Amino acid sequence: MSVLEYKCPHCGGSLAFESKTQQMKCPYCDSQFDVKAMQEYSEELKRASEDHFGWETYDKTTGSGDWKPGELEAMVTYGCPSCGGEIVCDQNTIATSCPYCGNHAIMTKQTAGMLKPDYVIPFQLDKNAAQNALRNFYQGKPFLPKSFSADNQIENISGVYVPFWLFDCDAHASMRYKATRSQHWSDARYDYTKTDFYQIFREGGIGFDKIPVEGSKKMDGVYMEAIEPFDYTKLTAFNTAFLSGFLADKYDVDAKQSQPRANERIQRSVEQAFDATVRGYATCALENAAVRFSHGAVRYALLPVWMLNTRYRDKMYTFAMNGQTGKFIGSLPTAWGKFWAWFLGLFICLSLIGGVWIYLA
């Protein structure tokens, strides 16, 4: 024998039918619910599903296939003995230092086993643009040490084709929210608050095209997301000629290993889109979210990034610039003497203002 029990959506207590009001009532928080609404709510809870991510396997058969004869022979790999970074370039490129840590790179021959990229976005901005972007990045930073911004501090600037996995999919989501609206009033004796509780359901689909996930452990994911987006209308079929004069990072995170991050980015975007449709409530909280992917596809692309390394007081500072759009990101040192002088001046000014206000009051 099975027992059917309805739980209060508000506090989790067991609901009981109240004949006087013809509603389901919670004996713990006194919340009342329509019988039909509770039946629909109970059925919806049973139907609640889990996330499902269905990505295709990326390999030579689903990607661009094997390298053509002679393509790999024109490429060499430099391996950094300090950070382990591996960068791929043509035979005419001279790699004097690692774009990730600034140390000298050593040439090796490890191109065997690499998958051929499907696409590439060629560099649109040159080294001068990267240098100017760094100088502009220094502007308006009052606590930046003056010596840091000197030109001779720039130790290395490298144009690097960073490996990215681009994920496409259709996402179908089912969301359940708990929301409230409250009313307040008073009489001669008491203050009253009436709170109505709502169960809100959202269901629908969103298509995603070319969600990027970098395929390199050496690249800072925060940096790479910060210089997005890339203009994918400029994607072109991969050709080794685009590597001439630049470096190309060899991926060390394959498509399958990149799927969890793609899932996270897509799921977060879906939830944000659905959250934006729930308006007009005093409070609203997501109770259940189920996202299912279909038609999942992945492609391999090389995207242009300028990497800049600056050494200051024996510490390396790394910056990144989108080689197509010029979007720039990086961290800067702080001149703490300037900071505390500014803080002390602000404190003195506020103290004087406060003293004048107290005197006038």
Image (spheres, helix red, strand yellow):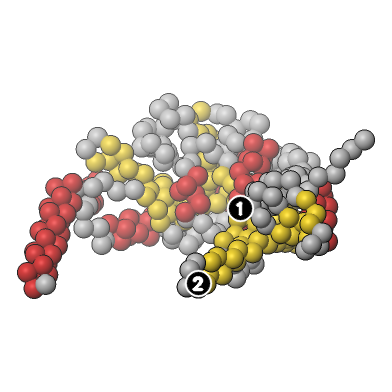
For marks 2 and 1, the one nearer the N-term is 2
Counting from the top left corner in percent of width and height, residue 272 is at 60, 59
Q: Tell me if residue 87 comes above or below residue 276 in the rendering.
A: above
Counting from the top left corner in percent of width and height, residue 237 is at 66, 54
Q: Which numbered circle lies on residue 44? A: none
Q: Is residue 304 left or right of residue 23?
A: left
Circle 1: is it few (<14), some (14-19), or many (20+) Cα within 10 Å?
few
Q: Tell me if residue 83 comes above or below residue 200 in the rendering.
A: above
Q: Is residue 192 left or right of residue 277?
A: left
- Which residue is painted at 64% across and 36% down in the image? 257
- Which residue is painted at 55% across and 29% down in the image? 109
Residue 193, visible in the rendered structure: yes
Image quadrant in which the N terminus is located: top right
Q: How many marks?
A: 2
- Which residue is painted at 64% across and 41% down in the image? 260
Counting from the top left corner in percent of width and height, residue 334 is at 23, 47
Q: Amino acid at mark 1?
A: Arg
Q: Amino acid at mark 2?
A: Ser
Counting from the top left corner in percent of width and height, residue 59 is at 74, 39
Residue pushed farthest top? 81
Question: Which residue does the numbered mark 1 point to in the structure image?
Answer: 268
